[in-house]
Image (cartoon, rainbow, N blue to C red):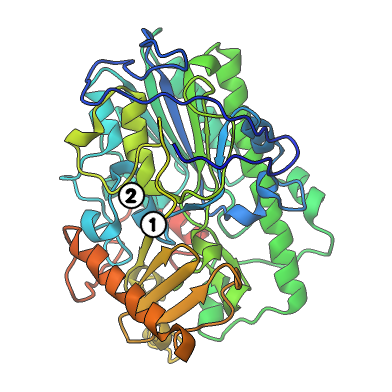
Amino acid sequence: MNWKLNLLVPGVLALALAVVGLSGGSDRLGAATVSGGDARDVPWNIVVIVMDTARQDRLSCYGYELETSPRLTELAESATLYTNAYSTSSWTGPSHASLFTGLHSVTHGATQENWDMDEDLTTFAEILSERGYRTFGIVENPMLAIDRGYSQGFADYYESWREEWRRGSGQAVVDFRKALDAGAPGQPFLAFVNLIAPHSPYSPPREFRSIFVTRPEIQLDSNMWREYYTGRVTFSDDDVTHLNERYDAEIRYADHLVGEMIDELVERDLWDDTVFIVTSDHGENIGDHEHMDHVFTLFETTTKIPFVVRQPELFGAGVVEDAPVQLTDVFPTVLAIAGVGADDFASHGYSLLGDTPPEDREVFMEYYHPMQVLSGYRRAEHRESPLLRPYLRRIRSLTRGDMKFIWGSDGRHELYDLASDPDELSNLINSDSHAEVARDMEARLSDRLGTMESSRSAEPQADDPGELDEQTREALRSLGYLE
């Protein structure tokens, strides 16, 4: 193993514990070994939580100066916290499809151009369900609806935005308790939970808002980001500051909900038998790079995410700084924890059980033609706004070491040195001193694409939300996806 474990922030231990791998190919429940090397008789429960739209640099467990994530900081004391962690896109659908299947967008096909996850894909929930696990999913984001194919493999799938749901109600935790109540004693379970916080429009309960918001509140509308891109809304510096404060409050609320689920597992005497994974699907721009929300870009602000894995008997307690990890790694890691040979299933990820990816791993991300954005504009004059034209393209990025290359289908490419320019403010693509690096990175990106089977057309494909029931339509409208 090539681990670099250091103390990151107070409360996060820097203990290099032994991590023992899986004997590949076993389909027997509980085949993952513990630190003593003996096979475990009782299968591990597995919980995967996505804090929707949580960017890494805004969590206090990653060094943010405000205390936005006290429960995650506490969790990290007995967990592995990955600092070099990335999504695979900057939107909900593609990222969750990658998490469930271990595949990049070019292969799984759920993209900004296609809102659905194909039923021919194989998810970790399907695999574990066939091997005796009880599987349940709980989702607060209506983009992950059953009708979109994201429930594949989950015996029970709670669409928490339905019925009497309201933002800030903690319905996901209520459904988590219901799902645990419904389980058979002793049967291992795989739980997936999507928390809509801290997704816009940043409306956490008042008790969390009061911790961070320091100025009179401005009126927020879920469609403001779309109006921003067509010039109908502008944000002053005070507005941006206020939005950032509310975003911090949203993260603190999501952290609170994660803590409530931890407490529930502890109270039921399930915690010691559970592998607990917390991550995000993507980040957020709040004035960064003159962008709002998480559209049109693959900057670090929208792609660098939290990634914490807790089970001391399997994973070290400490910080992994150098080895890049991605959402595609969740799929093989979950299989390995359950004692399933991941080699039998196609994946672009690495199992984090027993090892970490190499430090020279290339991080690959994609953002397709923004059909999901255009579908949110009801009026043609807004969809066809000249201000939107620069964003009507596909983009892909490849990061190798400190160098990050962003390819644009319109020929507008970008190159950043993340070591000297972590905020990606200086585009080096036209720098003579970096011309060779740019050519090499573009060639590497092309080679990377050549190794992956593509399910996507070479041309952008029009998509729309299709027939939606009123509850789902209203939930999407509340998130700004529909006018």
Which SS class for mark 2?
helix
Q: Is residue 431 visible?
A: no
Q: CA distance from mark 1 to mark 2?
A: 7 Å
Q: How many marks?
A: 2
* Residue at position x 32%, y 24% in the image: 22
Quadrant of the image occupied by residue 318: top right
Q: Check disc 1 and report the residue beneath it.
A: 88
Taking the image as shown, residue 436 lies to the left or right of residue 140, namely: left
From the top left corner, tell me how far across and down residue 184 is, in percent: 37, 10
Q: For the residues labelled 1 and 2, say whether their Cβ atoms are less than 8 Å apart.
A: yes
> Image quadrant for the N terminus?
top left
* Residue at position x 44%, y 42% in the image: 162
In the image shown, does 228 or 379 lie closer to the viewer?
A: 228
From the top left corner, tell me how far across and down residue 91 is, in percent: 42, 60
**Is the residue 57 above or below the residue 354 in the image?**
below
1 or 2: tag closer to the N-terminus: 1
From the top left corner, tell me how far across and down residue 39 is, in percent: 35, 11
